[in-house]
Image: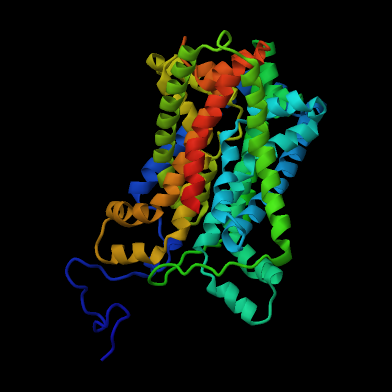
Amino acid sequence: MTTSASGGRPAGAPAPAGRRPLRKADETPAGRRPPWVLLAPACAAALFALLPLGYLAVRAFERGPRFAWNVVGDERTLQLLTRSLSLTAVVVAASLVLGVSLAWLTVRTALPGARTWSVLVTLPLAVPSYVAAFTWLASAPRTAGFAGAALVLTLVSFPYVHLPVAAALRGIDPAQEEAARSLGHGPIRTFLRVTLPQLRPAAAGGALLVALYVLSDFGAVSLMRYDTFTRAIHTSYRASFDRTPAAALSVVLVVMTVALVAAETRTRGRAGHARTGGGAARPAVPVPLGPWRIPALAWCATLVAASVAFPLGTLGYWLAVGNSATWDLGTLGEAAWTTLGVAAAGAALTTLLALPVGVIAARHRGRGARLLEQAAYAGHALPGITVALSLVFFAVRYAYPLYQQLPLLIGAYAVLFLPVAVAATRAAVLQAPPVLEDVARSLGRSPLRVLREVTVPLAAPGVAAGAALTFVVCMKELPATLLLRPTDVDTLATRLWTETGSGSFAAAAPYAAALILLAAVPSYLLGRHRT
């Protein structure tokens, strides 16, 4: 008697009650269409993220396609394109070197104090780029320009690579590396041929976040007096009531974003590193550093000193220069409370919108899934002022009660930082074995129950880490907050910018210090969770 592949039943026999037989399309998650329980909210999130593009289309072409093309094809625009891409390439390359090297040292080697270093190298996330730029300029004015902008942006953004790569290293089964070494491959060859290919999805996702962060940064490039698209767009908005040139430049940024996301998707390929074996993951045997231990410690110490200790030391100097006459503790406390509230709300909304998009990006392949993921990334490279103006345009015309209210600011955070949460969710779901979802579906679970009872619990640590990361970047956001905050409502970032703009560095120092300290708490917990 012939039996089927599902539990030894005779061929052609009906499935037991409460179950359904596995179909061919069920063999691979990529072979199924996303269920409506994921597709509908993912489409809603994508449409929300694309809202600024509607505004740009109206503004960029309101004077005709010829005028917009003249702006885009101008020699100045080509210079901005070259400068922006050059800065992005340098920062991404440097962040990959720093992030991957630190992840390997803190996770896979016998580095003394590896757990402590793993936490310390996440703390640069708490330092806003404009604060880092201010501290470097105050101490070394000659750093202004390309070199200074690249240095500052690298020091504040390399944790975007380190965190996902370190998480991937902990999730990879060390048996493959041990097998390679048993075949005579040395540590370096094993890393390059076995470990590094498995890190490609995590490294590519982190590099994409760094690239989008650099393209959308306004504070550091402005203080470093280095012209990029974001600085030129902000200047154009402030210098004229005609929004068309700035909108046309913003469209170029959107095109660059789509190209970067497409390149990252192609680089990522179909790689994954889900573990399907039973029991707890076996930790890798730490690689002894031998004579390289001192250089490795010096490497970690130098990076922590440049990215964390130096900004804090500079702020400590300005705090010592200031006194109670220049500090308003009441305003400081109110700004801190507001910052925590809007950042928490922004992180919650962003994570909620990112969950269906991240699951679809991880579990389903095809043009539709790629388009949804690319749409979610569309707003991240736009300057905050562009996103803010698009939401003001929408609120004034279609949702006036939201104008000059905090929900509009929280919505701007969701548009700007949706990729941060999507990347974390996608990476977390990729590490969860898809066979467990297939088993749940074979037992008759609905797509909603599979999502709630299997996918989300398995990916929960990674999703929570993404939410913490989103909370940190919401706290530091400046341009959109300046424009969308209600009257007489200030965050630490806006108060810091106001005091710095008037040259009151001693008065600005408490707001900068409070912002770093508050952002350091989730950054510390994020780093500790990853150890």
> Which residue shows up at 54% across the image and 53% down it?
115
Q: Position of residue 57 (x, y in %)?
A: 58, 26
The residue nearer to you, when weighing 478 against 139, is 139
The residue nearer to you, when weighing 427 against 124, is 124
Q: Position of residue 244 (x, y in %)?
A: 65, 19
> Which residue shows up at 40% across the image and 60% down it?
32
- Please say if 458 is above or below 10: above
The quadrant of the image that shows the N terminus is bottom left
Residue with the most extreme bottom position: 1
Q: Is residue 249 visible?
A: no
Residue with the most extreme left position: 17
> Which residue shows up at 59% across the image and 63% down it?
108
Q: Position of residue 308 (x, y in %)?
A: 63, 37
> Which residue shows up at 66% across the image and 23% down it?
317
Query: Residue 428 vs residue 300: left or right?
Result: left
How many marks on residues?
A: 0
Indicate the quadrant where residue 436 lies: bottom left
The residue nearer to you, when weighing 407 against 37, is 407
- Please say if 432 is above or below 508: below
Query: Residue 61 vs residue 30: left or right?
Result: right
The residue nearer to you, when weighing 283 against 425, is 283
Query: Residue 363 vs residue 247: left or right?
Result: left
Indicate the quadrant where residue 509 lies: top right
Q: Is residue 374 visible?
A: yes
- Please say if 140 is above or below 18: above
Q: Position of residue 282 (x, y in %)?
A: 47, 69
The way the protein has been coloured in the rendering is: rainbow
